[in-house]
Amino acid sequence: MTATPGVAGVPLAITPLTRKDFTSDQEVRWCPGCGDYAVLAAFQGLMPQLGIRRENTVIVSGIGCSSRFPYYVDSYGLHSIHGRAPAIATGIATARPDLAVWVVTGDGDALSIGGNHLIHALRRNVNITIMLFNNRIYGLTKGQYSPTSEVGKVTKSTPVGSVDTPFNPISLALGAEASFVARTIDSDRKHLTEVLTAAIAHRGASLVEIYQNCPIFNDGAFDEVKGAEPGIIGLRHGEPVTFGPDGAQGVVRQPDGTLAIADVAEVGLDRVLVHDAQHPDPTTAFALSRLTDTGVLHRAPIGIFRDVERPAFDDAVRAQVTVPAPEERQHALQALVRGQDTWTI
């Protein structure tokens, strides 16, 4: 993943920008130790590198702790209603191709009340970049279980343990035919910046799941992944999927087509899967997403699962309504108004 200044169709700043240019005058009000601080800092550091003007940057959020994000970035922003950020962002991206449109959402906002809007924005391939903060809990409303909480999770709303099967956001996005799907972690700023850079450069819908720690209501949810044991399975396009000390473990394909973890010394490096994020068929990317634990997280693939090109929804819509001359536009409008159907009352 390499940094590419700017985004196709979005004007670049005339003078160099700094992190300060993307820092608003609002007091940042998250709980001490919240992973949101790290994501905000990475974002404010990334934007000057991209060179996108502040007036051509729009951040749309829903409801939740993460959805305070637009207040803290000195750009255009909209704190919208619960779960509807992808729908509002679709309208903005369609009307204004000169804007870089970001959606900031959480696991509750995006995957519960907003689930329908999320999957259709991904299916349509709207040219927006979605940052999904996943802390596996409802933080703003004080600790209820969320659509990504593990089975058995004891919370204020599930005092004897959740019985819901959690969503795997990566699997969900791939099932919705998203053209760019990735996962990163709040505590790894370098990786976070690389993934977000690739996501915003992608033409179409990009979804980036960010594992984000909630120190108040779900502290340590990702400690096992981040710990000394090999919990992070790094994905890099064109490279064998190995992980752990000295790459001792790897991902291999089994006879039934599923993926599994094996010792590289036992199976040989030639049997280890080589990651292909650009393969048009999402089957293998989906299989990689299933390596994520659904209970207490011990391991999770991190990186870009899928990055393929296909037509963007907003480009196609604009092409439909664009006609070369005013008289043709007027003729098309009159034909639409008159129509072909009549009714007798």
Image: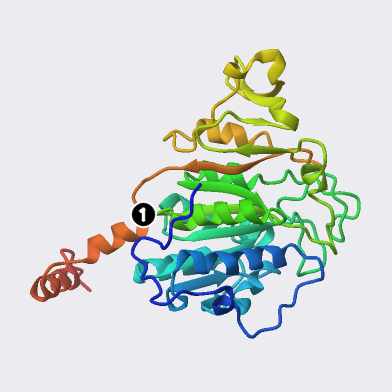
Question: In the rendering, at what x and y percent does residue 162 appear?
Answer: 82, 49
**Residue 286 drawn above or below residue 146:** above
* Residue 335 in sight: yes
Q: Residue reaching furthest bottom?
A: 25
Q: How many marks?
A: 1
Question: In the image, is 144 to the left or to the right of 168?
Answer: right
Question: In the rendering, at what x and y percent does residue 229 appear?
Answer: 81, 36
Q: Residue reaching furthest left?
A: 327
Question: In the image, is 187 to the left or to the right of 152?
Answer: left
Question: In the rendering, at what x and y percent does residue 175 appear?
Answer: 53, 41
Label 1: which secondary element: loop
| Residue drawn at (77%, 58%) of the image | 213
**Residue 179 drawn above or below residue 87:** above
Q: Residue reaching furthest front?
A: 16
Q: Quadrant of residue 116?
A: bottom right
Question: In the rendering, at what x and y percent does residue 139 appear?
Answer: 77, 65
Q: Quadrant of residue 318?
A: bottom left
Question: In the image, is 48 to the left or to the right of 246?
Answer: left
Q: Give the residue type that dot 1 points to.
A: Ala
Colour pattern: rainbow
320 and 312: which one is in front? 312
Q: Is the C terminus in the top left, top right, bottom left or bottom right quadrant? A: bottom left
| Residue drawn at (65%, 67%) of the image | 41
Question: In the image, is 274 to the left or to the right of 107?
Answer: left
* Residue 87 in sight: no
Q: Residue reaching furthest right?
A: 160
Q: Residues within 10 Å of mark 1 (few under 14, many from 20)?
A: some
| Residue drawn at (48%, 54%) of the image | 3
Q: Quadrant of residue 36?
A: bottom right
- For disc 1, the marked residue is 312
